[in-house]
Image (cartoon, rainbow, N blue to C red):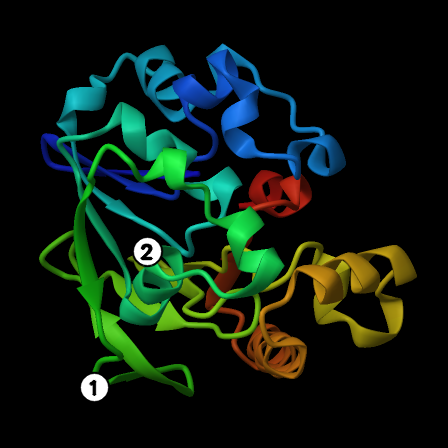
Amino acid sequence: MLLIEVGRRLVLVDTGFGSADVLTPSRLGPVRHLLRPALRPEETAVARIRSLGLDPAAVTDVVLTHGDLDHAGGLVDLPHARVHLLAAEQRAIQHPQGLLEAQRYRPSQWAHGPRITPHRPGAVRWKGFEGCVDLSAVALGMLLVPLPGHTAGHAGVALPTGNGWLLHAGDAFHSALSLQERSMRPDVRLRQGLLAHDEPALRSTQRRLSALVRVDPSVRIINSHDRGLWEQT
C-alpha cells in the first residue's frame, strides 16, 4: 500500500486485506489455502495509518491498481472514501467470468457498497503509455496508467516527485526479476502466468516497464509484492 498526504487529506493506493478478512478468513474463499496470507490486525491499512499518528477518517480517496482480494479487502474499513479504478476492472468485479475471476474478486469485500468512481482510458500519454487518466483532483499530478495483463483492468499509479516520478505498478510484475527476462525464476514466471487474465498482454506490459527502467532513470518503480523495491525507494 502507498499512503499519500495531500494537505490534511490522505490518499491510499490499494488497501491490502481488511479487518474483516483478519477476523473471518473464510471471507477470502478457498483460495486462501493456496495463498496462505499472514492476516495480522496490525498490518491492515487502518492500523498502519493509526501507527503513523494519522486518522483513517482523513482518507478521502482510494486508488486501486486492481480489485484482487489482497488489494481491495481494506475498503470495508474506509466506507467513506471514494474508490478510483479503471472501468474495465469495475466491470470484471461486478460480472466475474470464469473460475479465476470468481476467486480473485470476493463479493464480501464489496458488499458494503463502496463509492466507486470508474474511469475510462483517458487522453494522457505518459512515458509512452497511452490512455492514462489524470487524477490531479485526487492528488496533484497523479495518473492512473493502464498496465494490462494481470487483470481485466489492471493499472499503475504514477506520482510526480521532487526529482522525477514514482510508479506503483501493482501486480504488473511480482518480482524485480520479472523486468529482467533472462533472470526471471521459473516459479515466478509460472505464478504470474497462472494468475494472469491475459498472459501475452502481461508479458508486453513487463517488456515496456523493463524498457522504461533502462532508458529513464527519473522513474522509480515499485510494485505490490517486492519488498526490496520499497526499501530502495
- Depicted 53 relative to depicted 176: above or below: above
In the image, what residue type sits under mark 2? Thr
**Quadrant (top left/top right/bottom left/bottom right) for the N terminus:** top left
In the image, what residue type sits under mark 1? Ala
Task: Please rate how many residues cluster around mark 2, counting C-alpha atoms within 10 Å: few if below 14, some from 14 to 19, many from 20.
Answer: few
x, y percent for residue 47: 38, 15
Circles 2 and 1 in contact, beta carbons < 8 Å: no
x, y percent for residue 87: 27, 68
- Depicted 157 relative to depicted 131: above or below: above
Q: Is residue 101 visible?
A: yes
Residue at disc 2, secondary structure = strand
x, y percent for residue 138: 14, 52
**Foreground of the two, 233 or 139:** 139
x, y percent for residue 176: 70, 58
Residue at 57% across / 48% down in the picture? 103
Side of 69 where 90 appears, left or right: left
Between disc 2 and disc 1, whose residue precedes?
1
Q: Which residue is mark 2?
A: 161
Residue at 63% across / 77% down in the picture? 214
Q: How far, Cα to Cα, is label 2 from label 1? A: 22 Å
Side of 126 where 70 appears, left or right: right
Q: Which mark is residue 158?
A: none
Residue at 37% across / 30% down in the picture? 74
Side of 73 where 29 appears, left or right: right
Label total for image: 2
Residue at disc 1, secondary structure = loop
**Foreground of the two, 102 or 173:** 102
Side of 35 where 141 appears, left or right: left
Q: Which mark is residue 123?
A: 1
- Depicted 30 relative to depicted 43: above or below: below
